[in-house]
Amino acid sequence: MIFNVVITGIGGQGVITAAGLLRFAAITAGYRLTGADNRGGAQRLGHVSAVIRITDDDCEIRPLAPEIPKQNCDLLISLEASEGLRFADLINPGGTIVMNRRITIPTNIRRARLPYPTLAQCLIAYEALVSGGGRTSKVIELDADGMASDAFRKPILGNLIALGAGLSRSAPPGIVERLTSRLSEEERAAFDLGFSKQGTLT
Amino acid sequence: MPRPEASPTLSPFDPVPGRRLIVTGAGAAARGAFEAGIGLVTTYPGSPITETFEILASSENTARPICSLSLNEHVAFHKAMGFSLAGGRSLITMKHVGFNVAADPAHYIGYTGVKGGMVILVGTDPGAQCSTGEYDFRFYALHTHLPLVEPTSGQQILDCMRHAFEWSEADGVPYVIAVPAGACYGIEGVVTGMIEPKHAGTSFTESKTLTNVGRRAVENHRKLLERLEKIRREAEIRNLVQVFGNGREALIITSGIHLSRVREAANILGIAERLRIFCSTVTHPFPTDLLKTHVEACSRLIFVEDLGGFLETVISRYLLSLTRSPHVQGKDLFPAYGNLDLDMIMKGLANAFSVNIRKSCDESHTETAGITAVPDISKIPEIPEREGTFCPGCGYRGFFHILTEFLGPDDIMGGDIGCSSLPPHFSSWLTCMNSGTAIAAGVSLALAGRRQIVSMIGDSTLLHSGLQTLIEAAADDSDQVCFILYNHWTAMTGHQATPATPRTAEGVSRPHIDIKSLLTVLGVKRFDTIDPWRISGLRVLLKRVLHERGFRVVIVERECTLLSNRRRPASGWHRTYRLEPERCHECGMCYERLSCPAIVKNADGVLAIENGLCAHCGVCEQICPNGAIQEIQIRK
């Protein structure tokens, strides 16, 4: 079993924090782990992403590269709606996508006065990626920042809401239990909010 | 479901061996050095390897090594060398371009030898994701004559780091461990080992080999080459060669982080049975003796490596000595530039083995059997690159906004490394440390009087390598305005202090070099200081200094806002700004030209200031031509 995850967004959204929680849970549950962070844009509002590859195989016998092979990403969590589209070629047609309803137009696009994909365009693109084979769509669309602001007055907890929503649809056995057991009461509530509501299923 | 293990750990200093530590590659290196009981770590910070030093420096353990943040890599290298000559174990960490600065002593240390174990940890950057420039660092091994280690995983980074100090002591030379950015930022669960007591140094022994001149230099050279031959033979004993598979169609030679990529690619492509993979962790001197039987067994040889093709270059020389040379492929399959990732390795190998990559990928989808329709990603909108830019409140945003108002299209701006180099790149060039003022000095000799020439240098760069440049520029009266961008920290790499940092991160004043006094001593006659948050003052000053001739220095001083804002009380009244939509003419001055990330456009196209991001610098209020941005007080 290999479970491949990408969490992405922009600096300051808690991408690395969410990835760290998932990694710790996976190791605690006895899985092996590879992957890498791209933290280049952290604090400078640039692109941030984390690749998490979880396996129950022996990595000595069946090693995993730090990158996900094309069409093998089982769960994509895009905390900024457009950022996940950078990983379009990695998406497993049977995978799950979580799209946070938030677009931040890059400053280079502003200066050049260029068009930028809208939320609606992003959603259509994500649906096209995971509607293969006639299965029901697996895009979870939610306003994680808004939900976190309303429930906790802390928009930063949007990362846990999105993580909860994503793992509610698919996660290797034992991971959700390990993950939630380490959260504070408020973080747990945020994770559960995402896990139970799953945003708007499209 | 797998069987859970003993609880994993997040502490790189966990005293218990056998625990799984979740850590980056740079962090695994720190753990390995800690286990080896190093007495000293020196560095000049540089991505992707900064974290190794940062972790070691964060230890409160009594086994904490001396952690020395040096002015530059050249100084750091000598310091680590001296510590080793006195019998202690020392580590120097730097990025690949930092090694260029340390290259001078690095070309002596193999000749003089070392006493206590010494490791040179270099973060390389194929793809230049966090650097100005990429090059195949490994070629340095050929002319420094230093042994080179390329770990294949996070676990091997830890293990090699721990053992390399012993190898260094046994062989009398420092070991170089090269870790590419992809591995520095890679995250695994690595198994911890025992922590050795600290090797803090014993005594300094006089030795003739330390005077590397004339006939002695030649003798040292001879002995060093002998040592390398001994190290070449050690690879087998030290269990540093991994061979996978026994196929006869092709022998793949790879190294470092590419091993896991090659093995996964071979599995996905279904060619694992057809080949064998040879991977040595020590790639210089390369254990060619161990290669012989595999080369003879296979009809062709494929090198999988990035950039310049170090292995192909070195091993091809060996192949010429064989009676039958196999067919060799390498740089014809994998580009000699950029980062080599799994996808590119898949393509290269599919090409070499005439495998249909599309079909193999579809068959590898065991988890999603039954899904046949492949989505058409050609219709997915392309997402343009998202630049990282000055943080909200960064003094450089307002400074460059105003400076570029004064400069014409033909004027020349010399750029330097650091936060000032962040987009939107206004500078005319950006190469290495100290490139701003130093190159501008040459340009001004050619174009003096015909072009306005300004240059940038950060405070950390000034102390790294800029002092000599400033002395010369002042002595020559170089016709340029040199802006010293003084944000009090080496901010780009995570706020390391410099000798000119006036306050600690907590805000307590500390002894420091006064930049103005320093300039006086260097012979700079005309200098001014400006706060880049004060736009009208900035305009007045720029108008004056840009009108003058000769060497002028302006200290642009404002502490990095990320740090100063951390000291603000979390609650109470806060100054912030509000954008009045009815007064906004949508001229684009704040949203487009200043492009502060805290100024956002709502779904209905109206501009607003996002309070959570605003760092209340007030620059937008000062540049708005219609007074649409106003200061307000909010209670947090």
Image (cartoon, coloured by chain):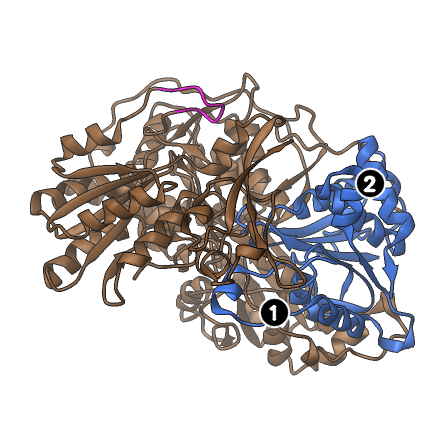
Q: Amino acid at mark 1?
A: Tyr
Residue at 45%, 55% (x, y): give it.
B626
Residue B380 in picture, x, y percent from top left = 69, 75
Mark 2, residue position: A151
Q: Secondary structure at mark 2?
A: helix
User: Is circle 2 on the same chain as circle 1?
Assistant: yes
Tell me where the magenta segment starts and ends, as one range: B503-510
Residue A86 in picture, x, y percent from top left = 64, 66
Residue B15 visible in image:
yes
How far is disc 2 from disc 1 in space, using C-alphas?
Answer: 30 Å
Q: Nearer the viewer, residue B529 or B182?
A: B529
Tell me the crowding category of disc 1: few under 14, some 14 to 19, or many 20 or more residues within 10 angstroms, Cα based.
Answer: some
Q: Chain of mark 2?
A: A
Q: Nearer the viewer, residue B144 or B120?
A: B120
Q: Which chain is blue?
A: A
Quadrant of the rendered structure where residue B243 is?
Answer: bottom right
Is residue B258 toward the left or the right of residue B89 in the image?
right
Residue B595 in picture, x, y percent from top left = 48, 56
Residue B80 has which mark? none
Residue lying at the far front of the rendered structure: B582
Q: Which chain is brown?
A: B
Q: Chain of mark 1?
A: A
Quarter of the image where the C terminus of chain A is located: bottom right
* Residue A84 on the magenta span: no
| Up/down of B305 relative to B581, above or below | below
Q: Secondary structure at mark 1?
A: loop
Is residue B43 toward the left or the right of residue B217 in the image?
right
Mark 1, residue position: A116
Quarter of the image where the N terminus of chain A is located: bottom right
Quadrant of the rendered structure where residue A49 is?
Answer: bottom right
Q: Amino acid at mark 2?
A: Ala
